[in-house]
Image (cartoon, helix red, strand yellow):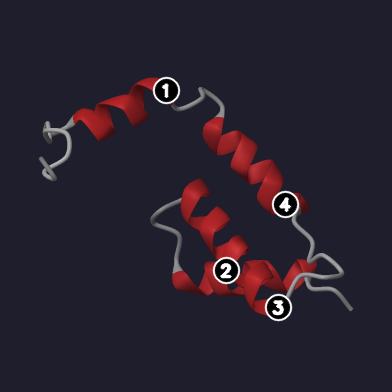
Amino acid sequence: DAQGPPVVAGVKSALLTQFTPVNYVQHNEVKLRGRKQGMEESTLEYYYDVLDLCRRVDPHMAEASEASTPLAGFAS
């Protein structure tokens, strides 16, 4: 049978809620503040990683804040 396992609504969100670390947001804030572009990392990889961290810290962050955040860690 190629149908796979049965789908139960709400299981994924319940598991994520139950097993998300207590200090998840603070951990991501520290990661975001200390994030610098690596020597072998492309600008796009760095930029999208920082945007992902911004969304993890604050899903409702304004686009202007998201866009300015990566500028601090670009490799020179």
CA–CA distance in space, label 4 to label 1: 24 Å
Q: Give the residue at mark 2.
A: 48
Circle 3 residue? 43
Instruction: Name which of mark 3 and mark 1 comes first in the sequence.
Output: 1
Q: Earlier in the sequence, mark 4 or mark 1?
A: 1
Q: With respect to residue 32, does 44 lie above or below?
A: below
- Real-space CA distance between mark 4 and mark 2, rounded to the nearest whole angstrom: 15 Å
The residue at which mark 4 appears reads as: 33
In this rendering, the label closer to the viewer, 4 or 2: 2
For residue 62, above or below residue 30: below
Task: Tell me the crowding category of disc 4: few under 14, some 14 to 19, or many 20 or more residues within 10 angstroms, Cα based.
Answer: some
Residue 67 locus on image (x, y percent): 57, 74
Quadrant hosting residue 35: bottom right
Identify which residue is drawn at 26% across, 26% down. Answer: 14
Q: What residue do we see at 54% from left, 37% from top?
A: 25
> Could you tell me how far apart the alpha carbons at marks 3 and 4 are, in whole angstroms?
17 Å
Q: Which of the numbered marks, if any, corresponds to residue 19? A: 1
What amino acid is labelled 3 in the image? Thr
Q: Residue at position x 42%, y 22% from top?
A: 19
Element on which disc 4 rests: helix
The one nearer the camera, 9 or 6, is 6
SS for tag 3? Answer: helix
Identity, as a three-letter code, of the amino acid under mark 2 = Tyr
Q: Amino acid at mark 1?
A: Phe
Number of dots carrying numbers: 4
